[in-house]
Amino acid sequence: MDDEEYNNGVDAIVASVLLIVLRRASLFRSKRLTPDEWVQFLGSVWPIVHGAREKSSGVARDFYDSERLRVLGLKEFPLNLQPSSFERFVQNMEPARVEFSKARASHGASMTVGSLISREIQDAARGQIITSVKKDRPLDNIVSRQEQDHPEKHSVDMAKFLEEAGRSDFKPSDVSTIDPADRIVRGWARVATGAETCAWCLMLISRGPVYLTAGSAGSRFTDDTALRMDAVGTLLDAKIKQWHPNCDCKVVPVFKISEWEGRHAWKAAEEAWIAATDDAIELGNREPHRVHKRGKNKGKPFTLGEDTINILRQRLMRGDVSMRKISGIAG
């Protein structure tokens, strides 16, 4: 299974479920729903969503195993599919409850329900990839032996890295001491299909692979990855696993820095982010006293990250940055 089959497989599952869910939602829109009736509605669609999440997890696991075999020649290992629970589903659907529970709820309220259910199904695939990376013991053993046998391939000259990070023409992916081409890693990365990608997602895609150290049970970054993020003004790791409704980002496994599905999009996204960061720095130098005029940050100065995101968002809206081109989509 390649990345296109992975994307198409999950998207087909989402589409088939939304057709049923939106028809079911139309039966509940005419009257005002009590909290109990809202839960009854969710209960009526839960078997369909639950089954779709299992199918989505299965597609993601097949893709993970295919990439693992293709890049490393390793056979699959036993692992349960991503779990689901009705209680968590109810919690995740809460943002749609108020508007959909109104008498004669709007079509938009139904679409919100649909977008949240779409995220539920997509999240099952994303979570399956991340869980597979975390619990891949055979791969963990290979990474551990590699680091023990060839420590020189994994050392990072911090002083050199920080010095180069200050250069205007610096690109994080150009630092060869961090990304030896033959280095085997345990990691995953966000990639976009190019259909719905926003500036926030583009920033996260520009980070490239999220590395896991050998023996790590969580998704913490190695020191060199944290440095690379700080160097381009990105945020810390807490946001990398957040997915907004209608987000088209997929998760792909990364076993070698030089060979993974979505690498070309990472480099293109990284270029776009760094260019926006340079312009944000210039804006800050020209107008150092700008502050937010409204919202929760009213009166607070704009941060470099906020300016960069805003500039990137404007470029996406104008078409100066094309997610279709970054994602390698023709046309």
Image (cartoon, helix red, strand yellow):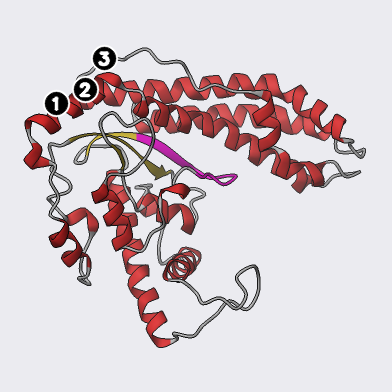
Q: Secondary structure at mark 3?
A: loop
| Nearer to us: label 2 or label 3 | 2
Magenta residues, dominant SS class: loop
Check the image and report above or below for 218 versus 267: above
Kindly identify which residue carries mark 2.
141
Q: CA distance from mark 2 to mark 3?
A: 14 Å
Say which of 215 and 230 sits in front. 215
Q: Is residue 76 magenta?
A: no
Q: Give the quarter of the figure containing the N terminus.
A: top left
- The tag earlier along the polypeptide, 1 or 3, is 3
Kindly identify which residue carries mark 1.
145
Q: CA distance from mark 1 to mark 3?
A: 18 Å
Q: Amino acid at mark 3?
A: Lys
Say which of 154 and 197 sits in front. 154
Could you classify mark 3 by the number of other residues whose Cα lies within 10 Å: few (under 14), some (14-19), or many (20 or more)?
few
Quadrant of the rendered structure where residue 166 is? Answer: bottom left
Q: CA distance from mark 2 to mark 1?
A: 6 Å
Task: State the mark number for residue 75.
Answer: 3
Mark 2 and mark 1 residues within 8 Å of each other at the beta carbon: yes
Query: For this view, does 34 lie left or right of residue 204?
Result: right
Q: Is residue 245 magenta?
A: yes
Quadrant of the rendered structure where residue 46 is? Answer: top right
Q: Amino acid at mark 1?
A: Arg
- The residue sitting at 25% across, 25% down in the picture is 140
The magenta segment = 242-252
Say which of 323 and 181 sits in front. 181
